[in-house]
Image (tube, rainbow, N blue to C red):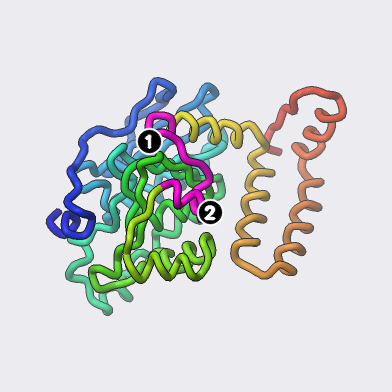
């Protein structure tokens, strides 16, 4: 923890995890060492993954990221789940990668094990993943939040890529996703200085969608996830895929891809049901078909 203290300003560790009366727990019994999982919301159609290494400020060790990847894979196979929320504690979403774990790594060991390679599983989720960020999201924690499709933040959240201060660079998307989200100049400033920035600045630069008081963050994130989950999972998946293509390719290629996906929706029962319900002035009954 001494390295974490030096880099992240001597943070005090909070043992408490986010809790709220709005949560409706479905199952806390799971074979995970570093996370907790629940199903929340009135219709129990939102998965909640909570990072659970409080003594290490949710530092992202290999085991934790493996747990997250496995939980996301499990929820992706659950047809009752329409969206996934990823969160941490009120003190820290994740204060960074586990520096103790990587301290003695070498180039050879990194290449042999494809170090950090499996972190992409979060970004590869078929179902939308929403980051609910309270407290510190630094280094790998900031990168983990950016792997999610939407970021909501508490107004005391702190973001940053401080890897430069320990003689390395971001390795899980910090130079790539951040640049696409906030532009070259701002990304350069963040990466080359290692400075932290708050939730309101993150919202202003387009990294965060909305900012709330800490106690309202999780209820508001669940509300968003429930709204997404009310739609056809097939159509949500196609829409997510199309937005990601815009993020990763040229405008011409993206427009062609979007058109193909739009045309594809007409092969689904849910598209017909949605349009029929609209003309009949009733709520649609999507069956994910």
| x, y percent for residue 96 | 29, 56
Verify whether residue 200 appears in magenta: yes
| x, y percent for residue 190 | 39, 64
Residue 199 visible to the viewer: yes
| x, y percent for residue 35 | 31, 41
Q: Measuring 38% from the left and 68% from the top, which residue is drawn there?
A: 191
**Considering depth in this image, is 258 or 124 the residue closer to the camera?**
258
Q: Quadrant of residue 216?
A: top left
Is residue 66 placed above or below 281 in the rendered structure? Answer: below
- Crowding near the residue tagged with mark 1, few <14, some 14–19, many ≥20 C-alpha atoms within 10 Å: many
- Crowding near the residue tagged with mark 2, few <14, some 14–19, many ≥20 C-alpha atoms within 10 Å: some
**Considering depth in this image, is 78 or 99 the residue closer to the camera?**
99
In the image, farthest residue toward the bottom: 108
Query: What label sits on residue 37 in the rendered view?
Result: 1
Label 2 secondary element? loop
Is residue 171 placed above or below 27 in the rendered structure? Answer: below
Residue 114 visible to the viewer: no
Q: Which residue is mark 2?
A: 206
Residue 61 in the figure: left or right of residue 160: left
- Residue span colored magenta: 199-217
**Distance in Å between CA atoms under marks 2 and 1:** 29 Å
In the image, farthest residue toward the left: 2
**Considering depth in this image, is 280 or 121 the residue closer to the camera?**
280
Looking at the rendered image, the disc whose residue lies closer to the viewer, 2 or 1, is 2
């Amino acid at each position: 923890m001494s390295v974490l203290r030096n880099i992240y300003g001597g943070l005090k560790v909070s043992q408490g995890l986010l809790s709220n009366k709005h949560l409706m727990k479905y199952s806390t019994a799971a074979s995970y060492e570093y996370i907790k999982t629940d199903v929340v919301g009135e219709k129990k159609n939102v998965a909640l993954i909570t990072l659970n290494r409080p003594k290490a400020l949710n530092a992202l060790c290999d085991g934790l990221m493996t747990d997250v990847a496995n939980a996301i894979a499990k929820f992706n196979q659950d047809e009752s789940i329409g969206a996934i929320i990823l969160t941490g504690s009120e003190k820290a979403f994740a204060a960074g990668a586990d520096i103790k774990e990587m301290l003695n790594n070498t180039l050879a060991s990194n290449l042999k094990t494809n170090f950090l390679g499996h972190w992409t599983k979060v970004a590869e989720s078929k179902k939308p993943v929403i980051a609910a960020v309270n407290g510190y999201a630094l280094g790998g924690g900031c990168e983990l939040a950016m792997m999610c499709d939407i970021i909501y933040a508490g107004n005391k959240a702190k973001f940053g890529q401080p890897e430069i201060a320990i003689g390395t660079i971001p390795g899980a998307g910090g130079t790539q996703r951040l640049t696409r989200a906030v532009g070259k100049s701002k990304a350069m400033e963040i990466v080359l200085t290692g400075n932290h920035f708050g939730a309101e600045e993150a919202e202003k630069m387009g990294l965060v969608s909305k900012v709330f008081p800490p106690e309202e963050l999780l209820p508001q994130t669940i509300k968003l996830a429930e709204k997404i989950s009310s739609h056809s999972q097939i159509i949500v998946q196609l829409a997510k895929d199309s937005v990601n293509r815009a993020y990763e390719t040229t405008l011409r290629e993206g427009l062609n891809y979007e058109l193909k996906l739009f045309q594809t929706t007409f092969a689904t029962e849910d598209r017909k049901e949605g349009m029929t319900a609209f003309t009949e002035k009733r709520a649609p009954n999507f069956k994910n078909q």
